[in-house]
Amino acid sequence: MIYSRKIRVEFNHCDPAGIMFYPRYFEMTNSVAENFFRDVVQEPYEAMMDRREGVPTAKLETTFHKPSRLGDLLDWRMEILRLGASSLNLRMEAHGPDGLRITAALTLVFVGSAGRPQPWTDAMRLAIRSFMEAT
């Protein structure tokens, strides 16, 4: 199943020429993941942070296909490729009005209060697995 979220390119995302500054894509990949955990896993980042847990990005590989510009509405699509013991491998794409803008492969890791990987909780694993198996 695909999780999707639309994000408009705003002035604060752009350089003086109105082209999206590439690190802003990374902020958007984090936003998509954060909203997935809120909407699907029912584990908002703030709740995890209150417990001193989190899901930081451990690996990120990207390909930039076309530039995005001020005002573009990007359609982000996220697919889960693999659910590990404490990790999650994702593929994200952002599409603009004229096609694919970026593809990204990410690995998120569930960490506990000591900052070390820990197994997903049963509820989180069930929610992620159910999402993966939905058609």
Image (cartoon, grey):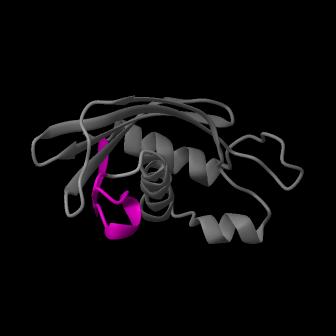
* 34 over 67 or under it: above or below: below
Question: Which quadrant of the view contains residue 86?
Answer: top right
**Front-lying residue, 122 or 112:** 112
Q: Position of residue 116 (x, y in %)?
A: 84, 42
Q: Could you tell whether 28 is left or right of 121 in the image?
A: left
Q: Could you tell whether 13 is left or right of 86 in the image?
A: left
Question: Residue 116: within the magenta?
Answer: no
Q: Could you tell whether 34 is left or right of 48 in the image?
A: left
Can the viewer see residue 17 in this picture?
yes
What is the magenta range? 1-19
Picture quarter with the C terminus: top left
Query: Which residue appears farthest toward the right when viewing the image?
Result: 114
Picture quarter with the N terminus: top left
Question: Residue 10: within the magenta?
Answer: yes
* 53 over 120 or under it: above or below: below
Q: Position of residue 10 (x, y in %)?
A: 31, 67
> Which residue is at a point 45% across and 48% down the rendered structure image?
29
> Which residue is at a point 58% across and 51% down the rendered structure image?
124
Q: Position of residue 84 (x, y in %)?
A: 61, 29
Q: How many marks?
A: 0
**Front-lying residue, 51 or 127:** 51
